[in-house]
Image: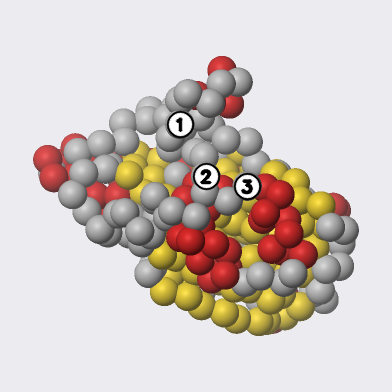
Amino acid sequence: MSRIVLTASSRVGCVRTNNEDMVLAFNKLVRSDSYNTEFESTNSDRFVVAVADGMGGHNAGEIASETTLSNLQYYISDLPRKLSPDEFHEAINQWLASINKIVDSRGRADNTMSAMGTTLVGMLYYSGRYYVINCGDSRLYRFRHGEIRQLTVDHSLNTMTGQKKHSNVITNCIGAGCKNSYLDFDDITDDILPNDKYLICSDGLNDMVSDDILCKLLQQGATAGELCEEAIMSGGYDNVSACVITVY
């Protein structure tokens, strides 16, 4: 049995006029708000904690991120019980193909939503196992024994080229005409230790706050809201969203 402490926050930042990020925190969608909860993993055989960073003109990014997270929440809740890890992986891939078509088709059907899409990163708990999923350049970090480590790989030109000049150019997402959208999918169940912390965030956090500072703040017990506030105090050039999950 594991006790899970979760803090989540999503903020518009200092420059943008609307918030295209959204957080799914266990059973609550969070945008321009904060949310804290605590629960026992044995009280449910499944849950999702995820961040989606939307993109697109007008308010299309907001729609893409909310559509994706709402759809994921209901999809996971409707899955049959006791799928094997391989069956669960296949189910998640089927979901991705479906949601990619949904988001992309809505963007094509309405010029105001042209090229709308979203990243997605998160932690899934299903049938006693923990999984990490990632599509795009939002991130999931693990904080353990005073050290922080990024567990996801950015799907970006920066990662492909090893250069920093392609800031915010991503190579994989949901929607936005991405025909070959894919999810990195990792089972981390056997590598979870008591008191591990997991940070899930949009690039509005890690672009503004270095890994060293994130590590220091997590060491001090910072909540998701406090991490977002640090990004805003550092300039807040983008929307910023974060979840901090502590497993006891």
Tell me the element at label 1. loop
- In terms of image quadrants, where is residue 246? bottom right
Residue nearest the observer in this picture, 32 or 4: 32
Q: Are marks 3 and 2 in contact (CB under 8 Å)?
A: no
Find disc 3 in the rendering and name its residue: 210
Residue nearest the observer in this picture, 130 or 4: 4
Q: Is residue 90 left or right of residue 109?
A: right
Q: Residue at x 22, y 53 (%)?
A: 59
Crowd class of label 1 (few under 14; some 14 to 19; many from 20; radius 10 Å): few
Distance from disc 1 to disc 3, alpha carbons, whole Å, reads 15 Å
Q: How many marks?
A: 3
Amino acid at the residue labelled 3: Ser
Q: Is residue 126 above or below residue 190?
A: below
Tell me the element at label 3. loop
Q: Are marks 1 and 2 in contact (CB under 8 Å)?
A: yes
Crowd class of label 3 (few under 14; some 14 to 19; many from 20; radius 10 Å): few
Q: Residue at x 63, y 47 (%)?
A: 210
Find disc 1 in the rendering and name its residue: 167
Q: Residue at x 13, y 45 (%)?
A: 112
Tell me the colour scheme of the image. Answer: secondary structure
Residue nearest the observer in this picture, 89 or 233: 233
Tell me the element at label 2. loop
Instruction: Quadrant for the C terminus, please.
Output: bottom right
Q: Earlier in the sequence, mark 1 or mark 2?
A: 1
Residue placed furthest toward the top: 161
Distance from disc 3 to disc 2, alpha carbons, whole Å, reads 7 Å
Residue 152 spot, x, y in % from top left: 65, 41
Q: Is residue 73 above or below residue 173?
A: below
Amino acid at the residue labelled 2: Asp
Numbered circle sitting on residue 207: 2
Q: Is residue 118 left or right of residue 42?
A: left
Q: Are marks 1 and 3 in contact (CB under 8 Å)?
A: no
